[in-house]
Image (cartoon, rainbow, N blue to C red):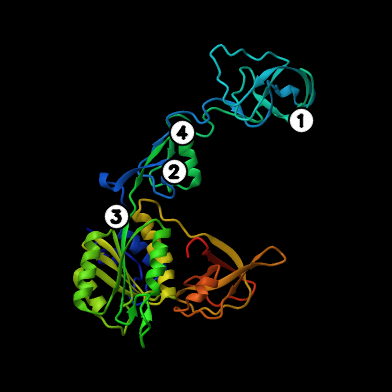
Amino acid sequence: MTTVAQITDALQGYDPQSVKVDDVVHIAQSLVKPLGNLPQDIEVLKLHAAAYRVLAQDVVSPTNVPAVDNSAMDGYAFCLNAGQVSQDLALTVSGLRLAGQPITGDDPTLQAGHCVHIMTGAPMPKGSNTVVPSELVQRDGDRVVVQAAHLQPGDNRRLAGEDLAQGSVALKKGQVLHAAALGLLASLGMATVGVVRKPVVAYFSTGSEVQDVGLPPKAGVIYDSNRAVMCAMLASWGATVLDMGVIPDDPVQLEQAFEQAATTADMVISSGGVSVGEADHTKAMMKRLGDVVFWRIAMRPGRPMAVGLIKDTPVFGLPGNPVAVMVTFLAFVRPALQRLMGTTPSALPVLRAKASADIRKRGGRTEYQRASIERNDQGDYVATVLPNQGSGVLSGMVQAQGLVVLFHDSGTVSAGDWVDVWMLDRFI
């Protein structure tokens, strides 16, 4: 089994007191073994119940899609030769063909100078290769005049197997079944699909100063906002959440929580207890139970973090402040969770925007600053950094449309400079 030390030893310039964001992403994903390789990791669902699940095996197309050459629009099907495209053509209408109309083996071949009135999706008649839209035709009884100057041979015809050829891989293992993917499976007539089971992620907050919501307020005690944040984000990204509540700074209870979580879940996440100067029960317990390292990451917000394995289960010890929890989840846990689910980790959507004002930035770390996004009169997106960037200010995350990402080696940004923005609507 690969250890954290073996992974970090291979990284150039690795420093646990100032770990680069890209290195954390790499290490976190290296500790995760994807689900889906064992029979118990796969479940078969009805197609309409499989939205946003991960495909467990390749899907091979059992047929051509479309099954036959067919019309891409309502119009008239006929045979157009290359030498006819500069002239109007007079044709005789020889019938009507509707979508879904069965075609028999003795379907007659369309004769030269004839056409068939055809509807979208209807099979092309034998001997035809082009469909002229109805609006480019003048019809008088069973005679039509086609404005062929607007056409090329093969226009508005969908070929058999144009979308998918029989025997080809329609979707690969690891594909997230979004709307388009589900539609493709439906086009193959599939009623069910095999998907990777949802990963179980155990989460608990730590700290004797943290209490559950619904209880009367106490002096020096804060409500547990992190659980609400994490349970929502985990569910949004397709995990089944094992909510283990708040664990106080008690070695016995912490040990029980980590043991239970690592035994029953596919991934464990805690928040709090990993910063310098905090009670070290959480850090000591994680280090004693497994292969766990503690970092100061070169980022803001979210500098303190723990990553490792307990009972071969990936464990993430996130910071205690809620904004730092959200940012470290998006940056590190989210791609590791995607790998666990059996799909390729994807980048968050990035918008290029102009800074509305100077943005102070210290070199040697990656910063994620909450910002509002608007469009100016020239059509450019403009990012305005919100005034209070404190890692405990959740109201800023509510107001923000995105996070301005200021990369490790960059410095202060000047007004009008282009910046990358993580768009947040889908994720928070």
Q: Quadrant of residue 230?
A: bottom left
Q: Is residue 410 visible?
A: no
Among the two numbered marks 3 and 2 on one chain, the one whose residue lies closer to the N terminus: 3
Q: Residue furthest bottom?
A: 219
Marks 1 and 4 close (CB-CB < 8 Å): no
> Is residue 371 depicted above or below 49 in this figure?
below
Could you tell me how far apart the alpha carbons at marks 3 and 4 are, in whole angstroms?
A: 31 Å
Point 53% across, 13% down: residue = 105
Calculate the distance from the C-alpha at mark 1 to the C-alpha at mark 4: 34 Å
Q: Circle 2 — which element?
A: helix
| x and y, in percent, of residue 36 in the image | 31, 48
Q: Which residue is mark 1?
A: 136
Sequence-wise, which precedes: disc 2 or disc 1? 2
The N terminus is located in which quarter? bottom left
Residue 249 in view, yes or no: yes
Residue 110 lies left or right of residue 61; in this view the side is right
Q: Nearer the viewer, residue 342 or 81?
A: 342
Which mark lies nearer to you, 1 or 3? 1
Q: Earlier in the sequence, mark 3 or mark 4?
A: 3
Would you name the residue on which mark 2 appears? 48
The residue pinned by badge 3 equals 33
The correct choice, above or below, for 160 with respect to 415 in the image is: above
- In percent of width and height, residue 98 lies at 62, 24
Q: CA distance from mark 1 to mark 3?
A: 58 Å
Amino acid type, label 3: Lys
Sequence-wise, the earlier of marks 1 and 3 is 3
Going by the numbered disc 1, the residue's amino acid type is: Leu
Q: Nearer the viewer, residue 279 or 102?
A: 102
Few, some or many C-alpha atoms within 10 Å of disc 4 (few <14, some 14-19, many ≥20)?
A: some
Residue underneath mark 4: 188
Task: Name the image quarter holding residue 213.
Answer: bottom left
Q: Are marks 3 and 2 in contact (CB under 8 Å)?
A: no
